[in-house]
């Protein structure tokens, strides 16, 4: 039944996601959010879906029915399992998407902190940038760039499901600028990273080659690996968890995973905290 309901919702969305009809989707989504939160919510379409909640605004290329408090819970469950950012922290959000995590990080680090949000896909980056503007996130620096093994340009896939776009094994896609994490770290003149969050759809192996300098200045990491995709028939190259764990351990991190979690994608999250007191001393 759930597959039927999903197909029905997808069919309705395709039927009305066009000029002259989108207001019906907007009205329905706003009404549902208002009922769930018991506070007025608004939805409109302006080259992307703009969803206004009482405590913030989301900008999405595809209309979602999640409400902001629900998204905040997801972000804390996934990206803040090992470390909770606090005032004054520097957070590097790699694979920022449309900014769900960025919005949460921004509020947690406050005016004395900084969030650098890096997103490769042009349309997704446009949503991220606009989300930052509408929420007046003055402590966020959005950067349009693919994190890779070297500088120059790379291809990123152009899937309708924007969260799945990747630079891994792309034959046709969109050309975007690229840089290593070490290059970004130097160009931004950072002295430390309190939390590195990375979700780059299986390209972790590529990125590890270009972060040997920055990792020494990083205190906590949250890396979403995608072995579960390979296990379910995806490319074998997406199986990167063991290499990520080895890399972190070789660079002085205590590694934490959630091996007993029933959700396969959560079991592939890798968290790390730097051993010793170097991070506290660097403040």
Image (spheres, grey):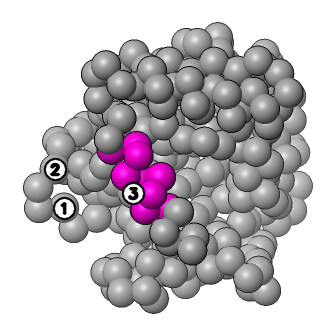
Is residue 103 in view from this perspective?
Answer: yes
Name the one closer to the observer, 204 or 157.
157
Q: Is residue 174 above or below residue 189?
A: below
Which residue does the numbered mark 3 point to in the structure image? 164
Which residue does the numbered mark 1 point to in the structure image? 170
Residue 234: percent from left, percent from top = 34, 81
The magenta segment is 6-14
Q: Residue at x 11, y 55 (%)?
A: 172
- Residue 274 occupies quadrant: bottom right
Circles 1 and 2, Cβ within 8 Å, touching? The answer is yes
Please, what secondary structure does the residue beneath circle 2 have? loop
Please, what secondary structure does the residue beneath circle 1 have? loop
Q: Quote the CA–CA distance across marks 3 and 2.
A: 13 Å
Tell me the quarter of the image containing the N terminus: bottom right
Q: Residue at x 55, y 84 (%)?
A: 242
The residue lying furthest to the left in this view is 172
Q: Quote the CA–CA distance across marks 1 and 3.
A: 12 Å
Residue 20: percent from left, percent from top = 31, 19
Q: Residue at x 48, y 41 (%)?
A: 97
Q: Is residue 243 above or below residue 2?
A: below
Circles 3 and 2, Cβ within 8 Å, touching? The answer is no
Mark 1 or mark 3: name the one nearer the start of the chain: 3
Please, what secondary structure does the residue beneath circle 3 have? helix
Q: Is residue 47 left or right of residue 101?
A: left
Which residue does the numbered mark 2 point to in the structure image? 173
- Badge 3, how many Cα within 10 Å: few under 14, some, many 20+? few
Is residue 187 in view from this perspective?
Answer: no
- Residue 257 occupies quadrant: bottom right
Q: Quote the CA–CA distance across marks 1 and 2.
A: 7 Å
Answer whether residue 9 is magenta in the image: yes
Q: Is residue 268 above or below residue 212?
A: below
């Amino acid at each position: 039944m759930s597959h039927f309901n999903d197909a029905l919702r997808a069919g309705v969305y395709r039927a009305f996601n066009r000029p002259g009809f989108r207001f019906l989707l907007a009205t329905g989504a706003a009404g549902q959010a208002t009922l769930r939160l018991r506070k007025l919510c608004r939805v409109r379409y302006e080259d992307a879906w703009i969803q206004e909640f009482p405590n913030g605004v989301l900008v999405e290329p595809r209309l979602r029915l999640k409400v902001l408090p629900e998204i905040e819970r997801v972000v804390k469950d996934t990206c803040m399992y090992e470390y909770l950012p606090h005032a004054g922290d520097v957070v590097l959000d790699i694979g920022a998407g449309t900014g769900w995590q960025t919005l949460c990080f921004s509020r947690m680090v406050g005016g004395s902190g900084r969030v650098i949000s890096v997103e490769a896909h042009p349309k997704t980056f446009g949503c991220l940038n606009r989300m930052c503007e509408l929420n007046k996130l003055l402590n966020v620096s959005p950067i349009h760039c693919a994190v890779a093994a070297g500088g120059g340009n790379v291809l990123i896939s152009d899937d309708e499901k924007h969260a799945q776009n990747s630079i891994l094994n792309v034959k046709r896609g969109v050309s975007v600028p690229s840089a290593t994490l070490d290059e970004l770290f130097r160009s931004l003149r950072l002295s430390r990273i309190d939390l590195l969050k990375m979700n780059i759809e299986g390209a972790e192996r590529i990125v590890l080659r270009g972060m040997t300098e920055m990792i020494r200045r990083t205190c906590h990491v949250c890396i979403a690996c995608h072995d579960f995709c390979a296990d379910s028939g995806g490319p074998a190259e997406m199986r990167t968890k063991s290499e990520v764990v080895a890399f972190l351990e070789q660079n002085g991190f205590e590694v934490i995973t959630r091996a007993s979690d029933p959700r396969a994608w959560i079991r592939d999250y890798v968290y790390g905290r730097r051993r010793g007191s170097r991070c506290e001393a660097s403040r």
